[in-house]
């Protein structure tokens, strides 16, 4: 596989950073040298790739299209190099893994240190994001594996390994009127104000569909956030409620004044699984998949996931 032109490599770094200054620093170049390389590439392609703004360097429409293409090529080249080393006995390999915040405790506890002990020369890149971001990255082949709630509709060519069903619990400030209840139902919570993730997220859609099926009023969600840390913080400082992943979530991540109350939600299931593109799966990605499947089975059997056998 041919190597990428250095100017293309410099373009990828600049696009990723969104700044000539930061990209130049990371590449070990001067800013004028990097700017010259970008202009040289733009002249060769016959298009403008960046708009220079006070906030940095923003991709043009042509730049975004070019970046999507060359980033895929760059990832494929990284994979090829690491696969050659892996198959040559170096136990290297490159794993690009995506996880949602709610599954991070389960995934990271399962994989580490097992994976890095077995493959000390491997390189693992972990991306934490919500579902829709990970689905797009899997579809574009930017990730080898993604562990997340399984959507109803999967992109064509994406395969699934189911790991576990993840029941919901409610979380709220300990001063909330419902905080002392042993269990709750959606009828109890429908009049509450909620902190929610984005409208496209599986957990939110699942709950809204459950409410609609019961003929209850729509959830009142005055605050939307894009991280669990933000969600937990808002819950801890208000009388709003939200959801917590009850099976493998880490209660230690919650603020001390936030309590978890089980929810009775008959017929509501959120399945967690591994997503991957159909076709070849690298040795390190396959091993990570095996470890996660084994960890899920061990958790279900009530044993530790940290001693996954080879």
Image (cartoon, rainbow, N blue to C red):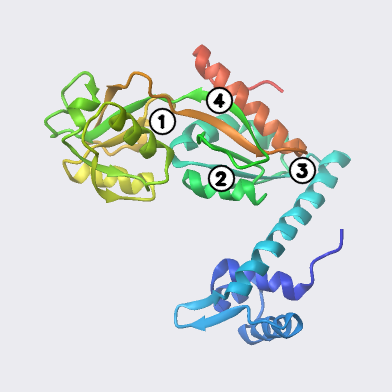
Mark 3 → mark 2, Cα distance in angstroms: 26 Å
Tell me what residue is drawn at x 53 percent, y 83 percent: 52
Q: CA distance from mark 1 to mark 2?
A: 21 Å
Earlier in the chain: of badge 3 and badge 1, it is 3
**Quadrant including the C terminus:** top right
The relative height of residue 303 versus residue 192 in the rendered view (above or below) is above
Question: Which element carries disc 1, helix, strand or loop?
Answer: loop
The reply to whether the C-beta atoms of the residues labelled 3 and 2 are less than 8 Å apart is no
Question: Label 4 belongs to which residue?
Answer: 163
**Marks 3 and 1, how far apart in space?**
30 Å
Residue 125 % position (x, y):
62, 48
Which residue carries the number 2 mark?
135
> What residue sits right under mark 3 in the picture?
92
Q: How far apart in space, not on screen, are marks 4 and 2 (Cα)?
A: 17 Å
Would residue 19 appear left or right of 70 to someone viewing this image?
left
Task: Decide: is 50 above or below 225.
Answer: below
* Mark carried by residue 249: 1
Residue 307 in view here? no
Discs 4/1, front: 4
- Residue at x 33%, y 29% (from the top left corner): 210
Q: Earlier in the sequence, mark 3 or mark 2?
A: 3
């Amino acid at each position: 596989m041919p190597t990428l032109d250095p100017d293309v490599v410099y373009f990828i770094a600049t696009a990723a950073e969104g700044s000539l200054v930061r990209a130049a620093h990371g590449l070990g170049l001067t800013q004028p040298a990097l700017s010259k390389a970008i202009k040289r590439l733009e002249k060769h392609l016959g298009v403008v790739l960046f708009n220079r703004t006070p906030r940095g360097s923003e991709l043009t429409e042509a730049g975004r299209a070019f970046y999507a293409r060359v980033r895929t090529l760059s990832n494929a080249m990284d994979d090829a190099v690491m696969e050659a080393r892996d198959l040559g006995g170096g136990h290297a390999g490159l794993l690009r893994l995506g996880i949602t915040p709610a599954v991070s405790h389960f995934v990271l506890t399962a994989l580490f240190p097992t994976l890095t002990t077995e493959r000390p020369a491997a390189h693992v890149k972990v991306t934490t994001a919500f579902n829709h971001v990970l689905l797009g990255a899997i579809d574009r082949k930017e990730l080898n594996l993604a562990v997340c709630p399984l959507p109803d509709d999967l992109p064509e060519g994406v395969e699934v390994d189911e790991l576990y069903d993840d029941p919901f619990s409610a979380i709220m400030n300990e001063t909330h009127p419902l905080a002392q209840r042993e269990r709750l139902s959606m009828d109890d919570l429908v009049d509450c104000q909620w902190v929610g993730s984005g409208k496209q997220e599986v957990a939110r859609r699942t709950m809204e569909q459950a409410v609609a099926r019961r003929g209850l009023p729509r959830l009142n969600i005055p605050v939307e956030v894009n991280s669990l840390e933000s969600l937990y913080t808002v819950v801890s400082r208000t009388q709003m409620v939200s959801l917590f992943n009850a099976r493998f979530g880490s209660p230690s991540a919650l603020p001390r004044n936030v309590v978890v109350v089980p929810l009775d939600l008959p017929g509501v299931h959120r399945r967690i699984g591994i997503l991957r593109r159909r076709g070849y799966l690298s040795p390190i990605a396959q091993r990570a998949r095996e470890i996660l499947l084994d960890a899920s089975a061990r958790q279900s059997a009530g044993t530790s996931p940290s001693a996954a056998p080879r």
